Amino acid sequence: MAQITREELPEELTWDLSTVFESDEAYRAAFDKLQDELPKLAEFQGHLADSADILLAGLQEDLRIERAFEKLFVYAHQKFDQDTANATYAGMNAQVQDLLAQVSAVTAFFQPEVLAMDEKTLSEYLQNPELQAYKHFFDVLLSEKAHTLPAEQEALLAGASTVMSSAEQTFSVLDNADIDFGDVMTEDGDIQELTNGLYAIMLRSKNPAQRQEAFQSLYDAYMQLQNTFASTLSATVKKHNFLAKVRHYQSAQEAAVSSNQIPVAVYRTLEEKVDANLDLLHRYVALRKQVLKAEELHNYDLYVSLVDDVDFPVTYEKAQEIALAALAPLGEDYLAIVKKAFSERWIDVVENKGKRSGAYSGGAYDTNPYILLNWQDTLDNVYTLVHEMGHTVHSYLTRHNQPYHYGDYPIFLAEIASTTNESLLTDYLLKQTDDDKVKAFILNQYLDGFKGTVFRQTQFAEFEAWIHEQDAAGQPLTAEVMADFYGNLNQKFYGPDVIADPEIAFEWTRIPHFYYNFYVYQYATGEAAATTLAQGILERGQAESYKDYLKAGSSENPLDVMRKAGVDMEEGDYLDSAFKVFESRLDQLEELLKK
């Protein structure tokens, strides 16, 4: 059956981008206008230190350009995403990417010029009442001063960025294009080429032989290139350590987390608390071995559901009802925004030919916070809807309570809002059903999600910290050295009930996040914080302090924002609370599976 085309979709299931620009012609006029205005900002270059008024005017012009560009980007990008085969919108998307490069070039002088200013002079300028409104903005900018090099050296590093990124690019080409995983037999008896997508499906197969074949075929390919992948990863680690050293950080880890105003203590607290609670993961793994009736439990047995698929079809209309009921503890003001998203066409709901896959929440300060879905009538899609709605309401409240320069939020805070919504949905679904099989299915999904996000991402974080420490100490990162450490680390995390498959020691060869520079820990901290916040909302009525976090944007440091919401991420209490929820739900699943 042919996929439906964009033109055939009911209008109510598509997003309304006319609120961004009334027409493509209006977009093009705004595009041309901004392009013509870009040279105006250059008039401030070299003059920001002349007076407080000129500094203020330069800052406001810089922000005005960025704000106008974001609106153009949203329109072109989302028009392209709704039908990537549409040549007109493909061209618009390419043009707006070119404009991004122009905007970046024109605005590049601002930060280094401010950082080069005499501290006493800048301090006097910032007493200007109008500049006081940007105090935190300048505080964050100036926090980088000790780690910013003279202009000539910064220019050298910028010029070398492409060369220094070559190892990541090589990994990406190998991983996405050149590596051949061979052919496997699917459940239907068909011979198919193994891909990463098919691998994920086969690991959830009820047939152990299917899981084993996929696992071994995939890792055979990676292990054949283990020395090449060791070379690309080692080169990336050396780059991170080099840049941290020349920028006067104590470590690459400190350099990476400081970019979000996060102290290293948050990372270390996560590692310590997860390590202290590995017995819970071992217990879940032992339950998995028991339910699967496996004489031996292998690493390829860790993803198959412990509960047979549950017939839980959910139409999009029903999903909206469920979302509103599940999110009701957040209050009528929160629900009013959700209802606006449903009624005012902020959501592009269903698949159509050429539409981008997946889901996201997007938009800019001066647009609606749009959601892209590819709806299927499944429970997973209900979770996707409330997840993206978490981002969307976060964006809406931030943009309606903060000026433009504080109207966004760092990645560290982003996933907390979406995952809190998922936790509220899980609680709602568990309370709404009397069907033990459905309850077990939901609990299994929750526990697997927690396993994959808090435990697994912390495992990755520990490995990432170790390889950077080893390189900084002058130890070579060979394939053998990394495989030996990773294999032992994997065994520590999953415990004695899992066989130490030799292939799993090479899992590091296939994880792109190890090239992202200390990124993954934020998945774990976000999931744990969200679990704790959801419990506070449900058990202690802490919805108002939670919404204060959603309104804060980047007006304060992320840790201060979270403290006001009731979570101190430098301390371990929020993690203790999250592990108690995990343990409680593990108790429930164990009881249900005994019946």
Image (cartoon, rainbow, N blue to C red):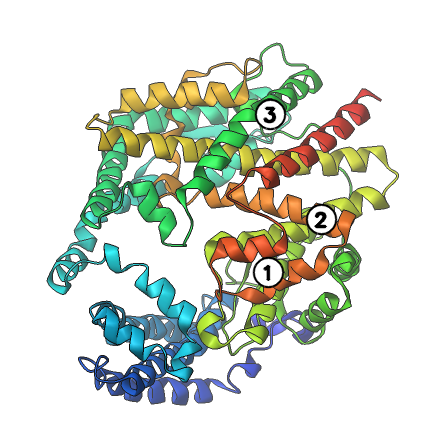
Figure disc tally: 3
Residue neighbourhood size for the residue with mark 1, other residues' Cα within 10 Å, grouped as few (<14), some (14–19), many (≥20) = many
**Tag 1: amino acid:** Tyr
Distance between the alpha carbons at the discs numbered 1 and 2: 14 Å
Residue neighbourhood size for the residue with mark 3, other residues' Cα within 10 Å, grouped as few (<14), some (14–19), many (≥20) = many
- The residue that mark 3 highlights is 281
The reply, left or right, for residue 411 in relation to residue 464 is right
Q: Are circles 1 and 3 on residues that touch, CB within 8 Å?
A: no
Q: Position of residue 72 (x, y in %)?
A: 42, 78
- The residue that mark 1 highlights is 549
**Earlier-in-chain disc, 1 versus 2:** 2
Residue neighbourhood size for the residue with mark 2, other residues' Cα within 10 Å, grouped as few (<14), some (14–19), many (≥20) = some
The reply, left or right, for residue 428 in relation to residue 581 is right
Q: Residue placed at 52% from the left, 56% from the top? A: 560
- The residue that mark 2 highlights is 536
**Earlier-in-chain disc, 2 versus 3:** 3
The numbered dot on residue 193 is none
> Does 59 appear above or below 78?
below
Helix or strand or loop: what does disc 3 sit on? Answer: helix
Helix or strand or loop: what does disc 2 sit on? Answer: helix
Residue 3 showing in the rendered view = no
Q: Residue placed at 40% from the left, 26% from the top? A: 219
Residue 205 lies in quadrant: top right
The reply, left or right, for residue 243 in relation to residue 516 is left
Q: Position of residue 482 (x, y in %)?
A: 31, 24
Q: Which of marks 2 and 3 is in front?
A: 2
Closest to the observer: 26 or 266?
266
**Tag 3: amino acid:** Leu
**Tag 2: amino acid:** Gly
